Image: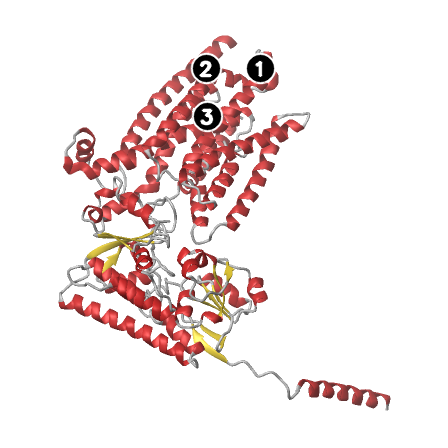
Amino acid sequence: MKKLLSMFLVVLLVSTMFVGCSDNNEEPKEEYVTVQDMYGNSIEIVKNPQKVACVSRTTYDFLIAFGLGDKIDGVYENVLANTWVQELNPTQEDYFAYEYNPSAETYISRDVDLIFSPEERITVELRKLGLPAMTVNHYGPEEGYDNQMFFLADLVVQLWGEDTEVVEKVEYWKNDITTTIDDITNTLDDNNIEEGKSIHYVRADKKDKGITYTENTRPYLEYIYRLLKVRTIGQDLESNKISAEELLVINPDYIVIGGIYQNGAVEASKVEPMNKLTAVKEGNVLTIPVGISQFEHPSSVASVFIKDQANKLYPELFDYDIAKLTKEAYKYYYNIDLTDEQTKNILEGKNPDGQYE
Amino acid sequence: MDNTNRMNFDMNKEKKRFLLFLVVGIVLLFITFCLSLIAGRYKMSLNQLVNAIFTSDASFDTERSVIMLLRLPRSISAILVGAALSVSGLIYQELFQNKLVSPDLLGVSSGAGFGAALAIILGASMLYVGLIAFVFGLLTVALTLGIAKLFSKNTALILLLSGVVVSGFMSSALSMVKFFADQETTLAQITFWLMGSFEYAKMEDLKLLFPLIFIGTTTLVVLRNRINVIALGREDAKASGVSYDVYKYILIVISTLLTAISISFYGVISWIGLVIPHIVRLAVGRQTQFTIPITIVFGGIFMLLADIICRAFTASEIPISAITGLIGTPIFIAILFLKKQVVKLDD
């Protein structure tokens, strides 16, 4: 009898606990959406994320441009250190500054819904710990960037698609890119321009590195220059450094200098033996604008970058008004009215004070 | 044959062998030097090389630039640094009577590495990176010597232990600096610096590098007979009327300066200071009056060869320590094997 009574009490207690759990005031369930990352992995992400860690340097600019600045929790510290970001500060927000590879505890303590990570190896480790991380960068998978151009734009629609303003901006950006690519490739085809010339991209994000530091995978830049019918020499290298002698052997037709230390690289190209390169001798050393984002990275101003490079590579075929286009893009995406001087500095790769870093 | 005659006979034999190796070494050094001017990614024939060097024909401008601005400075630098690190290694090995010692024993490499990394993350130019590396290299050795002094028995063993402890500390400090470095940019720069390279060698470097290494190595050549006595240990040195402590510190200072100056210009270069003295002893015996000049020559050859491999086969330059390690390890194992055979034969 005692046993029966004990069992009854236990059953009653457990039942009470379950009744307590099925409270009618339960919080609404979060809705999840399954998305694919750049590497084809399926990831479940909460729909309409409210706290995003933009640790990948190519994400901050996009989210702001698409009107999602209030969803950003923090940004990679080097992006925030960009003097143009400090000067123009499109959202006037004081974002948390993330390191390149913050600890999992940092993300957990900040309670983020989504992490845009810069490298797949970092993403994999974060995901093992149950964190909602996905890789977004300007390299893409091994086969190249060809199918990644709209990756982030499409992802934004998947995650924040209920916001019509966001969708509208994304569609505007995608149309702009498509039109730009079509215009340029059609013009090049009409003029029978074939891929043959070579270009050496100099990654001038280090001081005193001359012009031998580059990108050696098949990144976004390789895709853009392929559209422009020039071949990046970095894609054939074993590492992101090329020796001075190898550069003399390859002797590229063009040198294009990106990053924030452009001036140092431009000066280095004028010094012997680099001044023996055909690109230097023929004045084919180009520079890449730097604003809120470096134009050589995927960004809201991607179409301006493509047009700028088309102008520089084929001055006889293209004459886009890059200053006007830059001003329009900054107005549309960031609601910033650039002055003539600011525009000039951005296009010349200078900082807001009109100086080279 | 009595003992004195036998010793004279042995000495003459060693001297003849020394002269042979010296002549062969100098010839090899010259050949390797010429090879280093010809070899590289930018292919050029002997005819182009001669025209570029000995004529002012404008059609050889690019070849002239490659030789005079890229290959010549790095080849001379490689010879100087190879000689400096090898002879420093030999001096340390003789001084501490320990054949596993290398020139960074007292912490000069770890100290210089920490200094360079600190300078890199602070955004210093490469000139200051070298200067700060040099200062920290010397400060680290001073710290090692200071700690050793604290002990009443200031033996070679205490100095060795002190070097290990201080090196360990500086390595941890370096790890801390690397942790704070920007992973996208400066961390890679620090890593490359720590692996050494002659890629950025310039003729201007030689204005400082050449006199310092020349004076340092010449002093060691001049002192080679005394070093022989010092290598026998404190008691034997005293019995021979040589002030052991004075010479010990002079030799430590010279070797450390040679190492520090080399590292501060071209980064940390491993193995050469350990391996070359062993090869030389195998060739000409233990007498430092013979080993020091040969070490200088062999060190230059080894480093030149390593540098040619670094730059001639790949589009990007391979760090020098990667090559010295890859070549040095099998050579070191071969030496151990050969020495074992010699010991067996002696038995």
Q: At label 3, which amino acid type do we have?
A: Arg
Can residue B38 be seen in the rendering of this structure?
no
Q: Which residue is mark 3?
A: B281
Q: At label 2, which amino acid type do we have?
A: Asp
- Determine the CA span between mark 3 and mark 2: 15 Å
- Determine the CA span between mark 2 and mark 1: 28 Å
Q: Chain of mark 2?
A: B
Residue A264: image tag: none
Residue located at (70% from left, 86% from top) = A20
- Determine the CA span between mark 1 and mark 3: 25 Å
- The location of residue A174, given as percent across then percent down, is 32, 73
Q: Nearer the viewer, residue A198 or B41?
A: A198
Residue B10: image tag: 2
* Secondary structure type for disc 1: loop
Q: Nearer the viewer, residue B113 or B314?
A: B113
Answer yes or no: are tags 1 and 3 on the same subunit.
Answer: yes
Categorize mark 2 by other alpha carbons within 10 Å: few (<14), some (14-19), many (20+): few
Q: Which residue is mark 1?
A: B243
- The location of residue B198, given as percent across then percent down, is 36, 38
Contact check, label 1 and label 3, Cβ < 8 Å: no
Q: At label 1, which amino acid type do we have?
A: Ser
Categorize mark 3 by other alpha carbons within 10 Å: few (<14), some (14-19), many (20+): some
Q: Chain of mark 1?
A: B
Contact check, label 3 and label 2, Cβ < 8 Å: no
- The location of residue A129, given as percent across then percent down, is 55, 67
Foreground: disc 1 or disc 3: 1
